[in-house]
Every structure is written in structure tokens, then in C-alpha cells.
Amino acid sequence: AQSVSQHNHHVILSEAASLELGCNYSYGGTVNLFWYVQYPGQHLQLLLKYFSGDPLVKGIKGFEAEFIKSKFSFNLRKPSVQWSDTAEYFCAVERTGGFKTIFGAGTRLFVKA
Amino acid sequence: KAGVTQTPRYLIKTRGQQVTLSCSPISGHRSVSWYQQTPGQGLQFLFEYFSETQRNKGNFPGRFSGRQFSNSRSEMNVSTLELGDSALYLCASSIDRATDTQYFGPGTRLTVL
């Protein structure tokens, strides 16, 4: 069965620090990969997605993620975080054409001003 | 463009009852997915509908069911409620899951007493 593992459940950073959130998945076939974010009191929203092509994907608000197929990883990065990035981040994967999204447990990021 | 709407937003039921939750997708979106979010299990996929057909389902008991109408609105039903069904139920819509982003609604918070 597919599964998604997020390495950190809680991360605390100071403003301007760099961010990297790890995500690994278990599935050997072709996958679509996603990072979602849930800001306090808001809906879950898409940060970025990878379907095919360039494995380095750029999303909203300066976030990017790199798909490394050999490592089954899709890590999220941001060079300089802001207080407004405080949120919960979810990595998700679905088998291409499977229409079933599997989410990781989430990482709560707190950015100190 | 209006977002995904879910009704009701909050619901309190007692064990053994049944409940129906409703989701209205973004206009033009034909795919609707449902998820259960709990602190212990995180976000779990329930099922996905496209043009009134269920294309995939998650690992939930048969008490959980859903349907989609010709206008793409979707309902999910939970029968014989258990305490463990207390959760936030999220609906997400997309034009077509194969290629398009999912947009999430605010969720329905179900409490089972």
C-alpha cells in the first residue's frame, strides 16, 4: 500500500532562516506529488505539484520542491521563511491515474518573528 | 468564482445515528473527493467521484458511502455513527483529477457523542 512519510512533525525557525521539509513515499510506479499548506483558520490549499517534466517545481510564495525519483523523495524548500509562513504543511502522493491521494501526517511550522 | 462549499459546517450527532454531509464543487468542476481529517490519523482519503461515478475509494467501512449528482454536487453519508467518526470531513473539487489541482472546502466538523 502507498504511504507518505514526513520527517518532522514540528519545526521552529526564526525569520530569514532556510526551510527544508522532508517527504518520502512508498510506491514504485508513476506518481503525482503535492505539497499543501493549511494556514491557521484557513482551507487547505495547494503550494505546488509535480506531474511530470522538470523535477524542480516552483510553487507559490517562494516555495519549491525537488522530486528525486531514485530516493522516492519530494522535499519542500524555501530559502528564507517569514512569520506568515507559520502553518501546517502536508506532503501528498497519488498514483498517476489512481484518483486517490495519500497524505503525510503533516509538519507544523512555527516561524518566530 | 465561488469556492467549494460544504454544509453544514458543524454537526453534533449521537452514536448510532446517521448523517449526510453535502459538498458543492466549484462551477465547472466534475471531480469531487472526500477526506476525513483527525488528529490521530491525519488526512485520509474516503472516495472520489467523477461524472456521478465513483472512481476510487479508501479503506473505510461500508458505513461510509457517497454519491454525486448530475450537477456535480456530492453527498457523503455515514450510518450507525461511532465515537471514532468524530472528525473534520473535507471535500475537494477539480476539473479532472488526472491533470488538475484539487481545491478544498472549509470542511464539516462532525462530533459524535
Image (cartoon, rainbow, N blue to C red):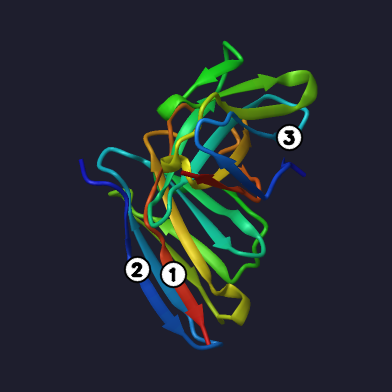
Q: Is residue A18 visible?
A: yes
Q: Which of A8 and B15 is in front in this view?
A: A8
A99 over B62 or under it: above or below: above
Query: What secondary structure is marked by label 2?
Result: loop
Q: Are marks 1 and 2 in contact (CB under 8 Å)?
A: yes
Question: Can you name the residue that lies furthest to the top here?
Answer: A54
Q: Which of marks 2 and 3 is in front?
A: 3
Q: Are marks 3 and 1 in contact (CB under 8 Å)?
A: no
Q: Disc count in the image?
A: 3
Q: Where is residue B31 in the image (x, y as percent from the top left)?
A: 41, 42
Q: Position of residue A52 (x, y in %)?
A: 57, 17
- The residue carrying mark 2 is B9
* Nearer-N-terminus badge (1/2): 2
- The residue carrying mark 1 is B109
Mark 3, other Cα within 10 Å: few <14 / some 14–19 / many ≥20: many
Give the residue displayed 66% in from the left and 61% down from the top: B41
Residue A59's label in the rendered image is none
- The residue carrying mark 3 is A24
Q: Nearer the viewer, residue A9 or B20?
A: A9
A64 over A21 or under it: above or below: above
Q: What residue type is labelled 1?
A: Arg
Quadrant in which the N terminus of chain B appears: top left
Chain of the residue where label 3 is placed in the rendered structure: A
Q: Nearer the viewer, residue A19 or A113?
A: A113
